[in-house]
Every structure is written in C-alpha cells, then in structure tokens.
Image (cartoon, rainbow, N blue to C red):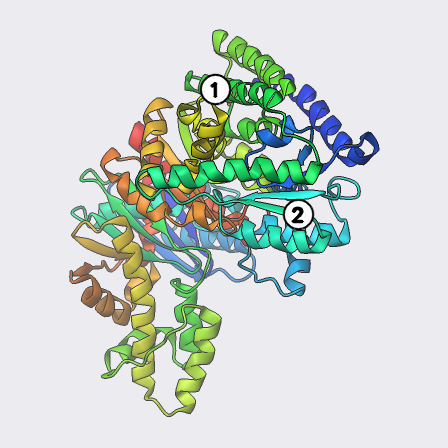
Amino acid sequence: MLTLGVDIGSLTAKGILFDGNQIVEKYLMPVGYNSKKASEKLIKALMEKAGIVDTDIKNIVATGYGRNNVEKADKAVSEIICHGKGVHFLLPHIRTIIDIGGQDSKVIVLDVSGKVSNFVMNDKCAAGTGRFLDVMARAMETEIEDFGPLALQGENPSKISSVCTVFAESEIISLVAKGEKREDITSGIHWSIARRIASMVKRLGMVTPVAMSGGVALNVGVIDTLEQILETKIETSALSQYGGALGAALMAAEL
Amino acid sequence: MAGRLKATKRMKKIMRRYYTQAKYAHLFGKKVAWITSGGPVEPLIAMNIIPVYPENHGAMIGASKMGGKLSEFAEGMGYSQDVCSYAKGDITSSITKESPIPGGLPKPDLLVCSNNICGTVLKWYEIQARKFNVPLFIYDTPFVHTEFTQEAKEYVDAQTQEYIQFLERVTGKKFNHKRMKKVWRLSLKSMHLWKAVLETAEHKPSPMTAFDAFFHLALIVTLRGKKTVVRYYQLLLKELKERTEQDVGAVENEKYRLLWDNLPIWFRMRWLSEKFAGHQAALVADTYTQAWCGVIDYIDENDYMSSLGEAYTRIHLNVGVDQMAETIKKFIKQYNVDGLVMHSNRSCKPYSFGQYDIQNLLREMDIPVLILEADMTDERKFSESQAETRIDAFMEMIKQKKN
C-alpha cells in the first residue's frame, strides 16, 4: 500500500510517494498564489507519473505552510517533525538539521532514535530565510541555481551590515554602484545569511553530525559558509529538497 | 469541558463598580491616584485614595484590540515603535479619550510610580505628571542582582517614610497608621488566597488555566488591601476546589501541561487558549500572575514600615536572571509541566531580555521551550500563521517526546 507526503511550502510544493520501504515517485512544482489548487495539481501529477489511482493511496499527510489547505490530506503535521523524520530516513546518523525554508528557517536537534528533542525557528524577520536569498539573487540579476556557485568565486566578501531583507537589498544596490565585484557581493550575501543561521544553531546547541534539508541545501554557497562558521561538515542528500514531503509520507505510513 | 468559572460574573461586577467609583471619585470627595502595577498601593487605600492602574487599562485596551491603533497615534506624536505599548496606549488614550472604558481613565490627582517593573514607567509617569499638572511620587527600587543588601533596605525603607509624607502633603491629612495596619494584613491575606487559587492548578487535570489567571488577576493588582478582594478569592477558591474534587479540568482531556512566561498576548487570548486546548494542552501556570504572590515570604504582617520596601523591591522583574530561572525551575517541578512557552514581548524588555539565558539555564532539566514573538497589546507585532506553525511544531515535539 502506498502513502503520500505533501509539502506545501511558501514557494514550492513537493510530493513523495512511499511504498513502506522506499520512495516510489517524487514531484516538485511552484506553489503560485493558490496553495489549495497547487496541492490538487501536485497530487494529480504525482499519481499520473506513478500510474496509480486514488484508491492505491492509503493515507496522505500534508506539511508546510499550506498544510491545512490540502483537502485530501488525512492529517496535517508541522515541518519540524516531518523534516526530522525525512532526514532520519535518508541519513540516519544525523543529529542536527538545518532547514532554510521560504518563510521560516529552523534548526532541529534529533535524539539518537530520530525523535525531535528540540528546535528553534527564526524570529519574525525574513533575514535568515530562503526568501532573503531569492530577493538578493534577483537584485544581483542571477538565477537562484547559479547564486551559490557565484558566491564561491568571491575572494573578498563584501560587508552586508543590515539584517533586514529590504534594507540589505538597498545596501547591495549601493555596493554595486560603488563598483564592488559581483561575486564578492554575492559571497557577502551568503555570509550574512549563514551568520544568522549559525547563531540559531549555537542557540540550540549543535550536536554533530549536521545535515541540511530543504531547497537551500542545493546552494553550495550557503553550505560552504555555514561549514566555515560552524567548523563542521554539513551533509546533504540528493533528496534534501524533499525532506519534509518524505517525512510526511513516512508519517502517513504510521497512521 | 468545564466551561466558564461561575465566579467570573461576580468579578466583572466588582470591576465595573470599581471603575464607576473611580470615575465619580470627586463627587464623593475622594482623590484618584494613578499607580504602576508593581507600585505600593496599600498606603493609598489606607488614605482612602482610589488607585487606578494605567497598566490594567492597557490590558483592557489590548483585549479590546485597540492596542495597534492607539500605539500608531503615539508613534505619530514621535514616540518610537519600540516604546512599550501600555505606555503608548495610555498616553494616546489620555489625549483622544479612546478607551474600552467610556471616556477613558478618570483624571488623576496624584501619580505613584515604582520602577521595580521597568524603567519606562519613569518617563511615562513624568510625561503624565506634566500633562495633568499633578504631583508625582517615585518609589525607586534598586535592582536585586544577587541579594537584597542592607544598603538597599535602608534606601527603600526611607522611601516608605517619604511616600507617607508625600501622601500627607497631597491630602492634607495625617497618615492613618491604624487603618494601614488592617490594609497591610488584608493585602497579605489576599496574596495567600491568590497563591492558593493558582496552586489548585497543581491538580491533574487542572481546574483552571493561565488564561483564567490572567483574567482573575485584575483584583489582586488593583484592589489588594480591600476586603472585597479577600471575599472574592475565597469564592473563586471554593469553586476551583469543587472542580478538583470532582476532577473537572479546564481543558478537555488534559494530556499536556505547560508553563507560560511573560505577560499575556491580550488580543489573542481566545485564539491561543483554543489553539493549546486543541492539542489537549493546559497552560497550568505562568510567571506573570504568580508575581503577585511571589514576595509573601518577605512580608512581616505586623511591620509594614520595614517590610513594604523589601516586598516591593524583590518582585520577579526586579531580580537577576539566575533568580528568575530558579523561579521557573520551581514552577516546572511544582506544576509538573511538559514544556515552557516564553512570550518574547516586544513591549516588555525587562521581562523578555533574559529569556534566552533562562532557556540555557534550564537545559539540564530537558524541558522543551518555545519562544513566541508577539506583544501584549500591539496586534501589529503578531503573525498568526507564524505563531501557529511554531505552536503546532512545539506540541508535536512534546507528544513525540512523551509517547
């Protein structure tokens, strides 16, 4: 019997189909302005891709910001528990998880059995979130995929002193006007977000080994700066972006 | 579910009468004093002066969801966004008369300010003293970093004397020591009763939640020292004891017990209460309402002249972080809680400042802590979906831990 995990984030929707032992199918799409419609589309697309029908799915668990808008879901669970479960499945030895989401960034500490023992989320400000990177990439006229690699090329990271997304953007415009190198500014942006995240990790008390979950795990610039600040390796998996959805699918199997 | 406490009705009546009396005080030849929530109120009651609390008014402004609007007006006058929303609400209301109480608070004849709760009140009361052109007494309580020293004791005891002289000057009457003796005893008695009320929540399931405590607190804040308060809390205690005897819980099928830190989020009481109840969680205790019975041990019921100062200096907000953490540890054990919810209150810096340190000091207890960012009255500082995500995640973690 199959279970489905749906993660409706503020930017992307992710789905994982799980058969009790392994991942059968995955799907990712932008959410757009209507998360309810996005979830319907996601479930439909995923079923088509796997060649299955409604009745093949035993349970659906939804997570992410739009978790309460998924009509077909049997249960809604917060991202914290789902990322914990998802990462524990992919990388069972991991004790600390960093997830930088569109609206929320969080650090989760797991106990040895994979249960969440503590977590911390960003304050109300958007400075340490995925949205920050999005806005900054746009300000630098760079595709988000190229943003991390560009940061790695910076030799003298620019100083971004503002912790506010809106003000940091205008700070960047003035750095551009001053003629600072694009890769240095980009590197500075990555240091800025990594410092914010690292302080959250320290606040909670880091337990190694550490992994990153969520879409920002694909950004090599963030991983690199975080590794330097935290002085530890940060592991990722090819399925990092699906961490929340996978956790939801695993939860669905337990219902 | 247990539903509303029956005593609530009586409480509302008492509060209504209190505010009506304050409004028409001058008709009865009585004076009105505005006083800070942690200020020594007993001498006022002994002198037949009606105490009025801008902070209690602030809570009402918050509960009526007027906090954001009133704060905005004050910001338009030049007050910073970061200034306490109780202060901004009071300053605005005294100008525009907007208030959940028709006409706003009655005009003061004198002001009494104690900085045992924060530093903001000094400027706030100075502003109002200038505005209303009335005398202001400042009861200055030194911060108790680690211990209450002999120097501190002498310093505050001298102020108790000055305070009495100030009241004699303002009223033109001799201070009534005989009456003060009675008031002091009644005040202590109501603190003991309030303590007993809060301690009924040790019972599983708890007959009340912190949301009830936030509401029933108003009397010990405003009228301690009066017989009405003693009688009311006796009534409330009786009702709560009936609930514990019959194992009636305030939250249906209470499974998880939580401790709350800081002031309430007045404009989201119902939402929060339903949110936690939905997770079968009862907020069984809080550091805020406990503050009104936290100094019982320092009070000598026969000697107000030399124990009033100490009692008002050693309150929860006027002690070091280590001591605050000790108090929280005590409550965690006493009320057998599964988690701590800390409201990081934009308005109240002295309450919110040490929260991360306290969290670190609690690490050995392995107690999950949730920090919720909001404000006691300014709804502009609150984001529902962010709060919801955090509360859900916190409760799921506690469930995972416990089961």
- Residue at which label 2 appears: B135
Q: Residue A11 at what x, y percent from top left?
A: 45, 61
How many tags in the picture? Answer: 2
Chain containing the residue with disc 1: B
Between the C-alphas of marks 1 and 2, the distance is 30 Å
Q: Is residue A136 above or below residue B201?
A: below
Q: Which residue is mark 1?
A: B301
- Label 1 sits on a secondary structure element that is loop
Three-letter amino acid code of the residue under disc 1: Glu
User: Can the viewer see residue A17?
Assistant: no
Instruction: Tell me: residue A60, above or below residue A148.
Output: above
Front position in the image: A39 or A140: A140
Q: Quadrant of residue B273?
A: top right
| Front position in the image: B96 or A139 | B96
Kindly identify which chain the residue marked by label 2 belongs to: B
Quadrant in the picture for residue B340: top left
Which three-letter amino acid code belongs to the residue tagged 2?
Pro
Q: Looking at this rendering, what residue extends furthest in the right direction?
A: B27
Crowdedness near tag 2: few (<14), some (14–19) or many (≥20) residues, C-alpha within 10 Å: some
